[in-house]
């Protein structure tokens, strides 16, 4: 009985290791895929995008930024400050552009506390397989502006562009 239990445990461990290996291989293939940074676009919406580009170029730039930053579920969370810094425009321009994008069905703006979550219309753009489009709202990538962070943390992240991962140590004074 003991021997049979040990044999079953060893078999299960082998199966789990095999699953881990298969999962690691899948993730590696996905990272190496030339399609890992592709976004799909519905050509039936070309006229709608041309209208946006010609009539509201700043709104179109915001839409392209959001599409670039969105996750596989078509969502991204960022502040107006992030949009202002990336596009080098004022808050009023961002507000008007977001309003145009909402009113014309390019995006939905959802609230998470005082933050906005932007869900890009999945009939226009999507990053994952088309059968995942019905899950287009969550989870979201969160984009933060360094200028919005507390001053003591801004100093700690001075070299963030040079590093992919930055470890920040919190001392007792900062807690």
Image (tube, rainbow, N blue to C red):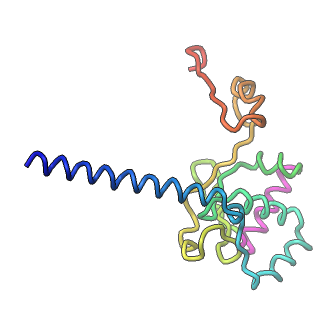
Q: Which residue is at the front of the view, 142 or 59? A: 142
The residue sitting at 72% across, 80% down in the picture is 42
Instruction: Provide the major secondary structure of the magenta segment.
Output: helix
From this viewpoint, which residue is outermost toward the left? 1
From this viewpoint, which residue is outermost toward the right? 54
The residue sitting at 72% across, 66% down in the picture is 38
The residue sitting at 33% across, 52% down in the picture is 14
Q: Name above or below for residue 129 compared with residue 27.
A: below
Residue 67 location in percent, x, y? 73, 63
Q: Quadrant of the C terminus?
A: top right
The residue sitting at 38% across, 51% down in the picture is 17
Q: Is residue 99 magenta?
A: yes
Count of labels in the image: 0
Range shown magenta = 90-106
Q: Is residue 130 magenta?
A: no
Q: Name above or below for residue 129 compared with residue 175.
A: below
Picture quarter containing residue 130? bottom right
Residue 35 location in percent, x, y? 69, 66
From this viewpoint, which residue is outermost toward the top? 173
Picture quarter containing residue 123? bottom right
Q: Which residue is at the front of the view, 35 or 149? A: 35
In the figure, is residue 79 to the left or right of 139?
right
In the figure, is residue 68 to the left or right of 55?
left
Residue 167 location in percent, x, y? 63, 28
From this viewpoint, which residue is outermost toward the bottom? 44
Q: Name above or below for residue 51 compared with residue 59.
A: below
Q: Which residue is at the front of the view, 20 or 157? A: 20
């Amino acid at each position: 009985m003991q021997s049979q239990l040990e044999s079953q445990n060893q078999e299960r461990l082998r199966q789990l290791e095999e699953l881990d290996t298969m999962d690691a291989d899948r993730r590696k293939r996905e990272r190496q895929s030339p399609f890992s940074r592709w976004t799909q676009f519905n050509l039936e919406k070309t006229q709608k995008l041309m209208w946006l580009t010609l009539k509201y170029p700043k709104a179109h730039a915001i839409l392209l930024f959001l599409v670039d930053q969105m996750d596989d579920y078509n969502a991204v969370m960022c502040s107006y400050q992030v949009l202002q810094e990336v596009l080098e425009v004022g808050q009023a321009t961002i507000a008007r552009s977001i309003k145009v994008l909402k009113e014309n069905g390019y995006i939905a703006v959802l609230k998470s506390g005082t933050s906005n979550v932007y869900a890009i219309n999945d009939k226009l753009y999507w990053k994952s397989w088309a059968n995942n489009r019905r899950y287009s709202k969550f989870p979201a990538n969160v984009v933060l502006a360094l200028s919005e962070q507390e001053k003591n943390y801004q100093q700690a992240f001075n070299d963030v562009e040079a590093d992919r991962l930055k470890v920040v140590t919190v001392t007792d004074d900062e807690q």
